[in-house]
Amino acid sequence: MKHTHFLETLEVRDADLFVFAELFREAAEKGFGSQLQDPLSESESTLLSNRILEETGLVIGWKSLKNYSMFVLRASPEKQENPTLATLDTLARYVLGAPRTDEIQRQRNESHFPYWFKYRESHPGPVRPPNPVRTKALAIGGLFAGAALIILLVLRSAQPSATERFEDRFSALQDDSLARRGWMVAGMDSSFWKRRAEAPGFLTLYTLRGDNWPAAAERPLIRNLLFREVGCECFSAEVHFSEFLPRKNWQQAGIVLLEDTSFVKMGVRLSVAYNDFSGGFQSSKEILIQAISSMGKGFENPEEVAHKTIFTMAQGQEALVAENLRYAALRIEKQGPVIRFLYSNGPMENSAFREVASREFPFQPRYVGIFALRGFVDDTVSVPVHISFFSLTCLPCGK
């Protein structure tokens, strides 16, 4: 297909933009199965962002993808896009089918962005002699711009973070609306994701097969994990459930902090769960608040930070337990290296939070997510989890 706009007139110094345009077209064609004809809508951009994340383990925001699509189709000398090398490499990884990774792994092992350069070598773009005077001026300008950026980042890092608060009551659950509010989805199961709005006034997730608990024969995976960037060192994250009563082992729902969404690195989760497993010994059916930390790939045994039984279900008591779980909430507070795990439950919404554990952890989470899962089992049904509220509050770090 011949594209006749100013991209074809670019000089060598601008050849990367030409190659980028071709790369983006290929990414869009892979994501949607057809050639890019019109700029992506917000929902299409969100879908492509999720597909890139699912396949590569890396994030390109939906707004960027939408802007790139407009640039590729309607580019002009007056308005140009300047994707970073990391973005170019992520697109190339998606197009070339590279193995999954995450930002930490890429920075450690592939900070030279090999897939972008591999793609660029096979797509040379327009070839024209450069203007040496202008090229030199651009190089000098680039040095000044880079120095200014470094100074800006240093100054920003030296300033205390302002207190910010994000709240979501999930009144709008369309893909584009969620994306505008900063939400992303990992481990997409489209058949159940389509049912997220089936209970009016709630986000509905299902306890699907999967887990981030290490298992020798299974890849860590939480399906339909709804997550967002944290963006601050000290914070409080909170989620509220309505009438969630797990009844089978490993069924649970909760909140998770992650260094990456492919579970290669460290993660900490807090959940409302069910348990009657005791290695063959007689045990009670219990509803518990459980906190788990996992060091990620290479560490087979996670640590159970907290295991607090809040109810046991003797025969005939299920209705009473359900009434006391009509409203349940979980909160994770991070202050420096210390993380507190709290919960509340009761027949009324405003029950007080209680602490179940407090511990120091050597990591800085990049993402916070809401999840529901049933572990790596096939004989347990998927039950709905109705979520009414989420908040993320950035806090000033203490001493």
Image: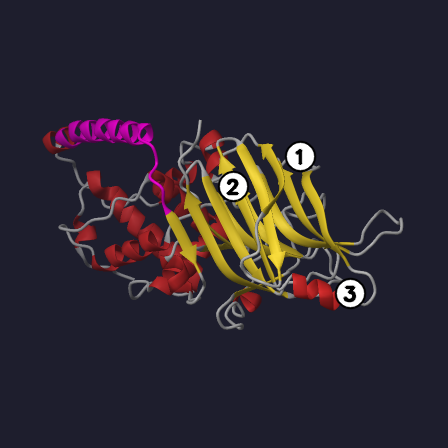
Residue at image coords 59%, 45%: 342
The CA span between labels 1 and 3 is 39 Å
Q: Is residue 166 visible?
A: yes
| Mark 2 lies on residue | 333
Which quarter shows the N terminus? bottom left
Q: Residue 148, percent across and down?
A: 21, 29
Q: Is residue 39 left or right of residue 247?
A: left
The CA span between labels 3 and 2 is 33 Å
Secondary element at image label 3: loop
* Rendered position, 89 above or below 73: above
| Mark 1 lies on residue | 299
| Mark 3 lies on residue | 317
The three-letter code of the residue at mark 3 reads: Gln
Q: Is residue 274 left or right of residue 83?
A: right
Q: Is residue 82 left or right of residue 228?
A: left
Q: Residue 316, percent across and down?
A: 81, 68
Which quarter shows the C terminus? top left
Q: Is residue 100 visible?
A: no
Tell me which numbered mark, 3 or 2, is placed earlier along the sequence.
3
Highlighted range, magenta: 137-164
Q: Nearer the viewer, mark 1 or mark 3?
A: 3
Secondary structure mainly formed by the magenta segment: helix
Tell me which numbered mark, 1 or 3, is placed earlier along the sequence.
1
